[in-house]
Structure formats: C-alpha cells, structure tokens
Amino acid sequence: MKAGIVGLPNVGKSTLFNCLSNAKAQSANFPFCTIEPNIGVVNVPDPRINRLEELVKPQAVQMATVDIVDIAGLVKGASKGEGLGNQFLANIRECNAIIHVLRCFDNDNIVHVDGNVNPIRDKETIDIELQLKDLETVEKRLEKVNRAAKTGNKEAQAEKALLDRIREALLQAKSARTVIPQNQDEEVLMEEFQLITTKPVLYVCNVDESAAVNGNKYVDQVRELVKDEDAEVIILSVGAEADITELESYEERQVFLEDMGLTEPGSAVLIRAAYKLLKLQTYFTAGVKEVRAWTINIGDTAPKAAGVIHTDFEKGFIRAEVIAFEDYSTLGSEAKCKEAGKLRVEGKEYIVKDGDVMHFRFNV
C-alpha cells in the first residue's frame, strides 16, 4: 500500500519526502527536479511499541512501515501530457492514497510556478487535471458499455448508470469519490474503474516556521474549501522539519520542537495520518527475541493477520491468543494478563483490533 505525495512544482514535495524517509530525493528551486518517482519505506511512529519494548526488553524491535512515493510536480495540461503529465498520472494511478501538498507560505526567493501564492487555485489546478483524466477514462468505458446496455444486458445497464453518475460529477468539477456506491456491485465496479479521484486524500499545508502551530490565512482558506470533503488537513513547516532531521541527537531535536511550540515532529503526525488514510492498522507480537508491529487492513480476521507473518500461519490457523494493548501495558506482562483473565482465545471469525498483542497457534 502506497501513499503518493502530489502538488504543483516547488511546493515542498521533495523536501517533505526527504524528511519522511531520510532518503535524499533531489530538492532544487525549479520544477521537475524529481523525475523518477522516489519510494521511501517509512517507519510509523507509535508510542505503543516503545512501551512494549520497555516491558519485554527484547533483542530486536521492528516498527510498522508505510510506503511514501514522491511524484514529479504536476502542471496545467498534465491530463493532455503537458510537462511530465503522462508519467505523473501513471505514477499516481499506482498509489492507493494521495498526500496533496499546498504551498501556504510567502517567500520571494522560491519561485511559484503560477507567479503568486494561492493554495485555492493550486488545489483546483491539480483537481481539474485529475478529474479531466478520469473523465477521459469514464467516457472511453461508456463507449463500450453503451452498446451492450442497448441490447438489454442488465450488468451493462447497471455499469452505465454508475458511469453516468460519475461522468456528471466530473463535469461539475467534483471528484469521483463524491459519488457514493449504492450497493456492493457498484463498490466492486468503482474498484475496477481505478479512477484517480476516487483515491482518499489528505491535505498538507506547507507553512513557514512561525505558522507551524496555528497555521495562517492560507491554511484557513484551505480548511474552508475542503470542509465538505471529509479530508484531514495537516499543518507542516516543511523547511523546519528538514532542519530537525539534520540534527544529530534526540535531545537537540526536542529542544528545536519546543522552541517551535510542538510536542513532536509534524512529519510523525503526517505518517500516522497516511497510515490511517490507507485504512491500515497495527497488531503486535511481543517476545524476548523480538517485539514487532505488523501491518494489516482494518477489518482483517485473525487468520488473515496471521498470514502476514507467514502463509503457513493462515493455512493452518487453529486459534489466536489475544491481549488488548491497554491491558498488557497496565499489567506489565503476558503472565500477569493470564492471571488476571485478560488473555482471550479467539477463533477464525475474530476481527483483529488495532493494538492487539497476539500469539498464533497453527498446524500445517
């Protein structure tokens, strides 16, 4: 599962990517400096794993990770191949969610591709290009489906009805995610269409250091614009975050954050938000050899979760022994949780909860 960072050129995408992944994507003051998409495998900050490490004292600790992709800046006309449009659109199609970076700071030394700072216009530029590309996809599909629908084919008629609704939304400059599937068949079709504007999105307002805590007038404009989108807005001073990652020690980083009025780096907030946006959650295994966070989809059953460790665990699943993280943290060990009756035995139908500490029994 991958989240792609998108935005106009020079809004801070590559600098943000560097902060998140500590990979050094080229960051320069001109458009298109990131031509190939860079992929960073980023640890998901989670205080729960620190607590388990403290209690279990394992030989190794493995955190959950999420893939972040830095995608070349998009310009007007991308849907028709302008700039690096075709490449951009192919790269974004491969991502499961979108992190949309908007420039919300004034700085005469950093060129704005459209001449002045206006996050509302910038957002609309990207939205329109993505919507135009989806409109092209929908219209091509409608050409094929229309013929079958005219012959009385029920499946084709159902698909045509959904495509017509999506087309209407796109023509009104609304994203495809605003069209709500009416039943399971439509949900399956929506997935099949692979439209770019159905992907979940979160907005990152890139501000200067002085606005890192409370935002500024540009952030207020963005919040107002997206209030009906059911999308999270995160304030981040990407320049300051880059400075923090350059500091050697944890103590130095904490002092820097305190001076800015923050308790943790904004990048940590963003990584957790991206993880949530991808509909991912974490369960833990905790033993003296290793404490580890495992990534699963929200709604996964115990056998599915076991299969993330090894396919044999899923095939030969017998049962799962489960302790809620809060109980493990409060009581301090697996043995004490057992004594207190807080260890549960769950079967194949159990839906894993975020933070479960699990041990699997299986037989192959």
Image (spheres, grey):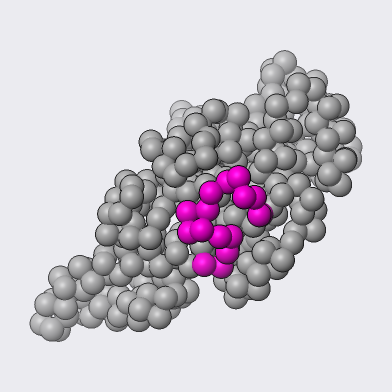
The x, y position of residue 338, in whole percent, is: 82, 36
The x, y position of residue 318, in whole percent, is: 55, 38
Q: Residue at x 13, y 76 (%)?
A: 148
Say whether residue 122 is left or right of residue 36. Answer: right
Residue 191 to residue 17: above or below: below
The x, y position of residue 279, in whole percent, is: 56, 53
73 or 55, which is in the foreground?
73
How many marks overall?
0
Residue 250 to residue 65: above or below: above
The x, y position of residue 185, in whole percent, is: 35, 71
67 falls in the magenta region:
no
18 or 364, which is in the foreground?
18
Determine if residue 192 is in view: no
Residue 150 to residue 206: above or below: below
Q: Which residues are magenta?
A: 105-121
Say whether residue 263 is left or right of residue 94. Answer: right
214 or 194, which is in the foreground?
214
Which secondary structure dominates the residues rendered in magenta? loop
Q: Quadrant of residue 53?
A: top right
Q: Residue at x 65, y 60 (%)?
A: 233
112 falls in the magenta region:
yes
Q: Residue at x 54, y 28 (%)?
A: 24
236 or 319, which is in the foreground?
236
Determine if residue 126 is in view: yes
Q: Quadrant of residue 54?
A: top right
Q: Residue at x 79, y 41 (%)?
A: 264
